[in-house]
Amino acid sequence: MESNQASDTINTQNFEQIYLEHYTALHRYAFTILGDEALSEEMVQQVFLKILEKQNAVVLHTSVKAYLYRAVHNECMNHIKHEKVKQGYQDYTLHQSESYTESASRKMQYDELEQQLHRSINALPEQCRTIFQLSRFEELRYAQIAAQLGLSIKTVENQMSKALKRLRADLAAYLPLLLWLLLNIKS
């Protein structure tokens, strides 16, 4: 059936003939857009399925051939657009998931660091621990600590040096996390 009739329509009587006449060319056309045999077949099938699902005959203001090519083109473009949206959502979800995983991992590392820091501080000798805590947590100067504890400033300095050396050794494995925390706290 040539599609240049006076009044072109697609109805149940001429559907099979139109399908057989145009399917192969429409499939090739879809393939030039999509580059995938199976997907091209699916798009052409989808166009014909939509025509079949219509209750009334499709009355055309153009030729059957032009109508079918436009319908296949639109179906392919809609598919491509849908795939881009899906890919964008997948990329977004992957990024969010990676971000969440990274922050959860960092939180676990931070909690572990905090626990190790407390264990290390508690493992210091009593005088050393007291001097360290007064210096770092109560932000007292060495002279203030010395006066409060009745020690010489030199003893406070030596005890702080001993505490820092011991903590540095205990927390060496956490240095990358400490650096990350310091860099991200300042920014």
Image: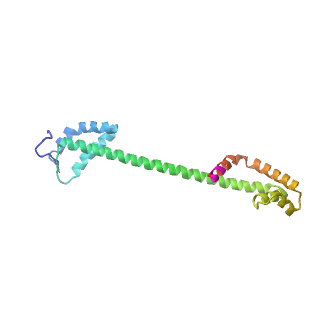
Q: Quick check: is 131 in the magenta stretch?
A: no
Q: How many marks?
A: 0
Q: Residue placed at 79% from the left, 48% from the top?
A: 165
Q: Residue placed at 43% from the left, 48% from the top?
A: 88
The type of colouring in the image is: rainbow
In x, y percent, where is residue 134?
A: 79, 60
Vertical placement of 48 versus 128: above or below? above
Vertical placement of 35 versus 142: above or below? above
Front residue (pair 100, 24) = 100
In x, y percent, where is residue 78?
A: 32, 47
Q: What stretch is highlighted in magenta?
A: 182-186
In x, y percent, where is residue 87?
A: 42, 46
Q: Residue placed at 33% from the left, 39% from the top?
A: 34
Would residue 165 appear left or right of 28 to someone viewing this image?
right
Would residue 153 appear left or right of 52 to someone viewing this image?
right
Q: Residue placed at 25% from the left, 39% from the top?
A: 26
Front residue (pair 153, 63) = 153
The residue at the far left in this view is 6
In x, y percent, where is residue 96?
A: 51, 51
Q: Main secondary structure of the magenta part?
A: helix
The residue at the far bottom in this view is 148
Vertical placement of 51 versus 152: above or below? above
Image quarter hosting the N terminus: top left
Would residue 89 appear left or right of 128 to someone viewing this image?
left
